[in-house]
Image (cartoon, rainbow, N blue to C red):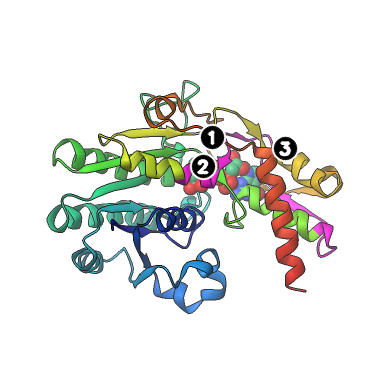
Amino acid sequence: MATALITGVTGQDGSYLAELLLARGYQVHAIVRREAIEDADRRMMNIRHLTDALHLHIASIDSHLSVYKIIASVVPDECYHLAAESFVSYSFDDEASVLQSNFNATHFLLASLKELAPHCRFYFAGSSEMFGHATTSPQNETTEFNPRSIYGISKLAAYHLVRNYRQNQGMFACAGILFNHESPRRGFEFVTRKITSAVAKIHLRRATTIELGNIDARRDWGYAPDYVDAMHRIVRHDVPDDFVIATGTLHSVRNILERAFAVVGLDYRDHLQFNPEYFRPNEAVALCGDYSKAARLLDWCPTRKLDDTLEEMVRHDIALLGARE
Ligand code: F7E
């Protein structure tokens, strides 16, 4: 039985990945912060149904020693490093912590694996934010990086580290450069979930408005379970490599508003308020991914339209809120 280790298992991607690996017969280990265990109702929501099947290790990946000890005891065959300070807006507020934690944790994992489990295949969750102010579109694996956020810079620095461990230290270390991807397990601060949860509240008469920033911002939004499937394909590919994972289609936040409110027969224009607090300085340009390398070498392609994902999210949020009544 192959053994996998996941960081970030309580998040959207980690939880879908754990399900996928368990279904494929892996023994799945995961590193979870003590704070998550102590606030399980909220922070372990995405993996509540999996806790009996998972081997959880309570630790902070900000500690090299903790990471080292866990790798020594698990000796994983595959390691998926998904944990990160991933909310781009917060990264403008606390630069040092985002840089340190996103870079150092990647380093602690790679350095420990190299010493204790050099056969291990390592996956790093890169981000389209690494492209930032891209000058060409769509972006692929050869596009120049020009990050505009501290989050993007931290991811890019860690990405170079991953490549270095692959190219100069012989490890099977690879990266997915993932564009935005959503699902009912998305964090509530990200714009899709912020909108679908607001639609649920407005529909159930718990709120009347939603406050947003730049609704003309455009992104390439995919479906999280598809992207987790891509991660596994990347790790199981014959050679370690980097892949852009995206849909190749742009939508605006306005499109998301239209669609999500339409699910319950409402018009977003009756409920929207602008709040300058949610406008971002130096926002990345409209990032759109070219996933042709993944299609060619991994036989991967997106399976879900954004409209269908949004409808699933709205219905899920209505049920969630209704269940709390
Ligand atoms: O913003 C605009 C905002 O916070 C999407 C993370 O997974 O994907 C995600 O990062 C867009 C931006 O995601 C609001 O300006 C307008 O253009 O949902 P988001 P993100 O920043 O693109 C990348 C690939 C990652 O790697 C990240 O980890 O929506 N927007 N008004 C707003 N966004 C938010 N959150 N809130 C607003 O009120």
Residue of label 2: 226
Residue of label 1: 302
Q: Nearer the viewer, mark 3 or mark 1?
A: 1
- Type of amino acid under label 3: Arg
Q: Please tell me in which quarter of the rendered image ligand 1 is found.
A: top right
Marks 2 and 1, the one that precedes in the sequence: 2
In the image, the residue with mark 2 has its CB under 8 Å from the nearest atom of ligand 1: no
Measure the alpha-carbon separation of dots 3 and 1.
Answer: 22 Å
Residue contact at pointers 3 and 1, CB within 8 angstroms: no
Q: Residue at x 37, y 70 (%)?
A: 56
Q: Residue at x 26, y 35 (%)?
A: 238
Marks 3 and 2, the one that precedes in the sequence: 2
Q: What secondary structure is marked by label 3? A: helix
Task: Check disc 1: other Cα within 10 Å, few if <14, some if 14-19, many if 20+.
Answer: some
* Quadrant in the picture for the N terminus: bottom left
Task: Check disc 2: other Cα within 10 Å, few if <14, some if 14-19, many if 20+.
Answer: many
Whole-percent x, y for residue 171 in the image:
18, 43
Where, by quadrant of the figure, is residue 244 drawn? Answer: top left
Whole-percent x, y for residue 318 in the image:
75, 60
Measure the alpha-carbon separation of dots 3 and 2.
Answer: 24 Å
Residue 216 lies in the magenta stretch: yes
On residue 254, which mark appears? 3
Q: Residue at x 32, y 43 (%)?
A: 235
Residue contact at pointers 2 and 1, CB within 8 angstroms: yes
Along the line of sight, which residue is nearer the eye, 162 or 218? 162
Residue range corresponding to the magenta coloring: 202-228
The image shows residue 157, relative to residue 61, as above or below, that is: above
